[in-house]
């Protein structure tokens, strides 16, 4: 693939990914509420969802969301429901002044990965972004397997930088809170963020 096209794609994706949305809200809420445990698994799921939508756009299968409307809605609302469940867990979590480290026994990394994947697959805004961007940069009818691989790797690299920055910022912010009242506020704030992400996904 032409290097200039790849750079334009990467630049546009960086701006879009860095803009706060349901995915970013869910990642930040996860880290604020539970620390770094499972953060990589969750963000990996979110990022892989982007690659799925990228692949759908390249293959010209935008009709998937309409053809398999029921399955699409099931994924969408399952992801939103899971985020609401996490929001409730954050809101009702017991806190103590020393509870700065996360409870690593609550949710498996596989479940977190699938939850992150559901967040992106249930967000049609991501699909619309790729469908709107790619035709203006490359001829989708001539994209080879190598071209798809280059675009996918560029996507994962950009998302790793953006998501990683948000994760580290959220983790650093979390360490600033050491009192029960502060931790309760963090948990409830995380719950609100997670619930907002769920509502944003369900409303699309």
Image: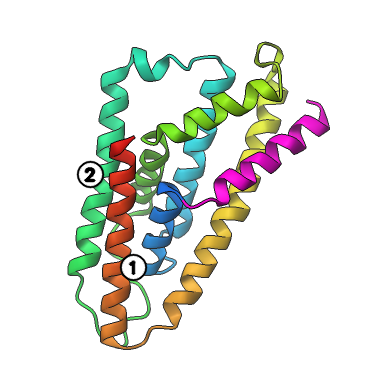
The circle on residue 83 is: none
- Which residue is pictured at 30% across the width and 19% down the height? 69
Magenta range: 1-20
Q: Is residue 16 magenta?
A: yes
Q: Is residue 93 left or right of residue 35?
A: left
User: What percent of the width, then of the height, locates residue 62?
Assistant: 47, 17
Name the colour scheme: rainbow
Q: Secondary structure at mark 2?
A: helix
Q: Nearer the viewer, residue 29 or 20?
A: 20
Residue 149, placed above or below residue 190: above
Residue 35, placed above or below residue 183: above
Q: Is residue 55 left or right of residue 195?
A: right
Q: Nearer the viewer, residue 12 or 37?
A: 12
State the predominant SS element of the stretch in magenta.
helix
The reply to whether discs 1 and 2 touch (Cβ–Cβ < 8 Å) is: no
Q: Secondary structure at mark 1?
A: helix
Residue 179 is drawn in which quadrant?
bottom left
Q: CA distance from mark 1 to mark 2?
A: 18 Å
Residue 71, placed above or below residue 21: above
Q: Earlier in the sequence, mark 1 or mark 2?
A: 1
Q: Which residue is mark 1?
A: 33
User: What percent of the width, then of the height, locates residue 45?
Assistant: 45, 44
Q: Is residue 200 magenta?
A: no
Q: Is residue 194 left or right of residue 31?
A: left
The circle on residue 81 is: 2
Quadrant in the picture for the C terminus:
top left
Quadrant in the picture for the N terminus:
top right
């Amino acid at each position: 693939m032409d290097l200039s096209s790849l750079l334009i794609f990467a630049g546009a994706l960086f701006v879009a990914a860095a803009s706060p949305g349901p995915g970013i809200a869910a990642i930040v809420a996860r880290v604020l509420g539970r620390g770094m445990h499972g953060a990589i698994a969750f963000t990996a799921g979110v990022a892989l969802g982007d690659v799925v939508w990228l692949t759908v756009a390249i293959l010209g299968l935008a009709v998937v969301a309409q053809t398999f409307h029921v399955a699409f809605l099931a994924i969408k609302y399952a992801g939103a429901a899971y985020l609401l469940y996490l929001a409730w867990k954050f809101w009702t979590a017991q806190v103590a002044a020393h509870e700065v480290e996360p409870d690593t026994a609550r949710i498996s990394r596989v479940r977190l990965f699938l939850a992150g994947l559901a967040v992106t697959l249930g967000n049609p805004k991501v699909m619309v972004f790729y469908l709107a961007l790619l035709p203006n940069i490359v001829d989708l009818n001539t994209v080879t397997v190598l071209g798809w691989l280059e675009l996918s790797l560029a996507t994962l690299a950009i998302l790793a930088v953006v998501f990683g920055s948000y994760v580290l910022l959220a983790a650093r912010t979390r360490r600033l809170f050491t009192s029960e009242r502060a931790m309760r506020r963090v948990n409830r704030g995380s719950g609100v963020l997670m619930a907002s992400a769920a509502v944003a996904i369900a409303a699309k």
